[in-house]
């Protein structure tokens, strides 16, 4: 079954792409999310506020018309709580169209530019896509790296190796 947030993101992407406004809508969405996370969410998620009252909170933001109409649809369908997940799916659709893959590389300490470049080149060669890397420092990692993208996890950490050994011994 297709995720509801993805369905909304797909609809928004189709409309934005058709009017050649994918980046404009993305920027408007980012601006809205910033405000949503800092102040608007308690009001837009409040069950006692009517749909009209919620729309009245959105309207003065003077955001891009297509995006504002999209927010109104989320309010009308009682799906405003999906706004963050829809954004994530929307960005994924844009990335897919641009053949861009966002990769998270977790390590015990910040990796050097050369190390990140080597990882980027290896993934680019393997996956045949443009790679964008985010290095996440995780002090719980003893050594090695963990690469995460599109639900895939390549765990080459010492932590994973030790856990694998421990599981093998217990079996």
Image (cartoon, helix red, strand yellow):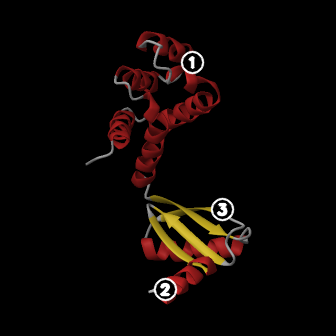
Q: Position of residue 102 (x, y in %)?
A: 52, 59
The secondary element bearing badge 2 is classed as helix
Q: Residues within 10 Å of mark 3 (few under 14, many from 20)?
A: some
Residue behind mark 2: 170
Q: Residue at x 44, y 60 (%)?
A: 150
Residue behind mark 3: 136
Q: Left or right: where does residue 115 sit relative to residue 126?
A: right
Q: Residue at x 54, y 30 (%)?
A: 28
Q: Quadrant of the C terminus?
A: bottom left
Cβ atoms at labels 1 and 2 below 8 Å apart: no
Q: Nearer the viewer, residue 98 or 48?
A: 48
Q: Position of residue 133 (x, y in %)?
A: 59, 63
Q: Earlier in the sequence, mark 3 or mark 2?
A: 3
The secondary element bearing badge 3 is classed as strand
Outermost bottom residue: 169
Q: Nearer the viewer, residue 17 or 161?
A: 161
Q: Left or right: where does residue 79 sit relative to residue 158?
A: left
Residue behind mark 1: 61
The disc at residue 108 is none
Q: Residue at x 62, y 74 (%)?
A: 145
Distance between mark 3 and mark 1 Cα atoms:
34 Å
Cβ atoms at labels 3 and 1 below 8 Å apart: no
24 w.r.t. 125: above or below? above
The secondary element bearing badge 1 is classed as helix
| Mark 1 or 2: the one toward you | 2
């Amino acid at each position: 079954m297709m995720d509801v947030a993805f369905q909304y993101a797909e609809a928004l992407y189709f409309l934005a792409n058709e009017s050649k406004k994918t980046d404009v809508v993305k920027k408007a969405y980012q601006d809205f999310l910033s405000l949503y996370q800092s102040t608007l969410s308690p009001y837009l998620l409040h069950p006692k506020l009517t749909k009209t009252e919620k729309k009245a909170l959105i309207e003065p933001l003077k955001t891009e018309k297509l995006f504002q109409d999209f927010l109104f649809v989320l309010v009308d369908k009682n799906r405003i709580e999906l706004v963050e997940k829809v954004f994530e799916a929307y960005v994924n659709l844009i990335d897919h169209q641009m053949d861009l893959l966002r990769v998270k590389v977790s390590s015990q300490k910040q990796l050097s530019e050369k190390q990140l470049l080597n990882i980027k080149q290896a993934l680019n060669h393997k996956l045949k896509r443009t790679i964008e890397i985010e290095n996440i420092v995780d002090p719980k990692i003893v050594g090695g790296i963990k690469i995460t993208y599109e639900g895939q996890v390549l765990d080459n950490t010492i932590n994973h190796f030790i856990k694998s050994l421990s599981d093998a011994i217990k079996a």
